[in-house]
Amino acid sequence: MAFVLKHTACILYCFLSFSRSNCMLRSTYFAAAFAPRRLFASSAKNISRRAMTATATATTSPPTLEEHSPSYKDLLEKLRTITHLNNAATVLRYDQQVFMPPTAAASRGKQMAVLASIAHERATSPEIGELIEKAIVDLGELSATCGEGGEVKENEDLKTAKRILELEKKQFDKNTCIPSELAAKKASLEASANAAWVKARQTNDFSSFAPSLKDCFATAAEIATLQRGDSTEITLYSQMLDEFEMGMPAERIDSLFSTVQSTLVPLIAKIRASPNAPSLQPLSGKFPIDAQKEASRKIVGGIGFDENNGRIDVSVHPFTMALSGKDVRITSRFTEEEWYQGLMGTIHEGGHAMYEQNLPESELSVDSALSMGVHESQSLFWERHVGKSKEFYKWARPILVEAFDKDGEEFTYSSEELYGAVNAVDFTNLIRVDADELTYPLHVILRYNIERDVIAGDLDVDDIPARWNADMKEMLGVDVPNDASGCLQDIHWSFLAIGYFPTYLIGAIMAAQLSHYCKEDIPDMSDKIEAGEFEEIRKWLTKKVHMHGKRYKSLDELLLAEVGEELNPKYFIDYLTEKYTDLYKVD
């Protein structure tokens, strides 16, 4: 999982102003005055027509909403100020995770609390709500002047402004519908529940965590109920999902995940029975940390992470933080006993970072990442469809050999051996974050089903361990020995992040779909990966995903517009089936 602080940003499209149009006309007439006389009459006639057209265009082109509406202009300024406050807090948070001495934790917490308080106070100010409402009225007035007979014909600036106001109104309503007492309760509960979770995991005692977990689910449900308001169109769990994957209700996810589960369970059983498992030997040995860092830096830079507009550091848990497209920071972690996790972590976070680096450079939420699922699709596109491909290891092998085949250590494995080792399936694994890409989807579906049923009232929190263990046996064929290796392994619920888990699998499904269409548009994509030529692939992703920010209202809407169909699990299932039946040599 990447920790991505989604910066708010906006870019307003530019249109010709009166003065610029007139300047263009003057240069046209200046050229005509010195034309040969025999051409002048016809030329002047044509120029006159062009001038009339240009004059009409200049006359009818509406001003931008920012020019028309003082309220909208003031709103944007205030929202950008909030963005800068949040970005200042992000710098402190990054420093805390990477550089800060542990003894500074208490003072850093106070610093961040002050910034958060100021930003929240400004974001929930009644003035923000008033400016949004006034700007909506001004937008309606301006839109009505864009067509004949009152017909609205929006230009790009007005479309963008409309989307900005939709997003900001939705966020403002979410921010202000929660009473301060409930917000304080949530903050306090996150701290106490997380501490209870840590202790319960250490002592393998779910019962000690259960009371806090019940409070987490109840408080999350209370907040979602307030955010949903009087609407009866969506379920409470769908409201929770919208916080992380907007426009993707539970009913839609049920259908997607059911298709994936019904295919993967028998496929995993078939792969498990194969005697042709690839060797894991290429992953074991002694790999100096500095050599791993340098190899990872070369590889992530090669695929497109721009270190001139970011940096790479080391932390306990890999993550990505973005202050703007010009300052995107990633971290990874390394151990001397193996090299694969460090490299894949760097590539994964590099995928998140390249999304952030290629978003439109502005300061409103319309130009931030669309959703957590879309964000995950970008990291998994590079990690799996590039970084775990056969062609990738033909390109990356020399870099790895240069890093590890020295100082008495041998690293002479072929690209085929490297490919096999990094894609091997561990059928005994119990831990989601350690799972391979074939079994990982079922880890996500298990968590999704459990939290959905708890919110619906169909599962009691006290029964989660039994349900967890039964589903692990049914889906993955493994016995869970204790709760620490089972339902206590993830931190998410202790932070009330209910609805987050499904975004991991949604991202994986989208990554496979994007890879399919990328290969259609770039037929020699595999050859380019083998040659280390990634620019065209990266530009394709920017065109299809990055440049749009939050202009689309959902992941489905983005895919429908950019590749011609909504999220479709077919490509994900085909990818896994073809890859693992080939790797394990089964029919």
Image (spheres, helix red, strand yellow):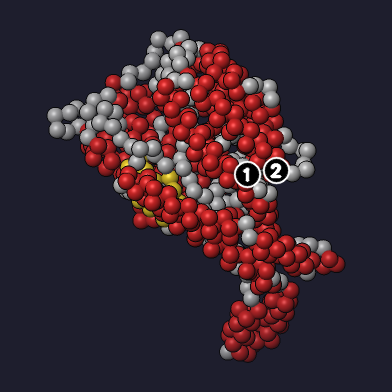
Q: Please identify, in this view, whether the residue under mark 2 or under mark 1 is nearer the observer.
A: 1
- Residue 556 seen in render: no
Q: Residues within 10 Å of mark 2 (few under 14, many from 20)?
A: some
Asked whether disc 2 touches disc 1, contact meaning CB atoms under 8 Å apart, the reply is: yes
Where is residue 424? Give x, y as percent: 39, 21
The tag earlier along the polypeptide, 2 or 1, is 1
- Residue 73 seen in render: yes
Q: Is residue 575 left or right of residue 567?
A: left
The amino acid type found where label 2 is placed reads Leu
Examine the image and state in which quarter residue 251 appears: top right
User: Disc 2 versus disc 1: distance between alpha carbons?
Assistant: 11 Å
Q: Residues within 10 Å of mark 1 (few under 14, many from 20)?
A: few
Where is residue 291? Give x, y as percent: 23, 38
Residue at horizontal 49 percent and vertical 39 percent from the top? 191
Q: Height in image: 160 above or below 109?
A: below
Residue labelled with disc 2: 226
The amino acid type found where label 1 is placed reads Leu
Where is residue 120? Give x, y as percent: 57, 55
Residue labelled with disc 1: 182
Residue at horizontal 70 percent and vertical 35 percent from the top? 236
Q: Is residue 89 left or right of residue 217?
A: left
Residue at horizontal 55 percent and vertical 25 percent from the top? 210
- Name, please, the residue furthest toward the left: 408
Q: Height in image: 26 above or below 541?
A: below
Label 2 SS: helix
Question: How many marks on residues?
Answer: 2
Label 1 SS: helix
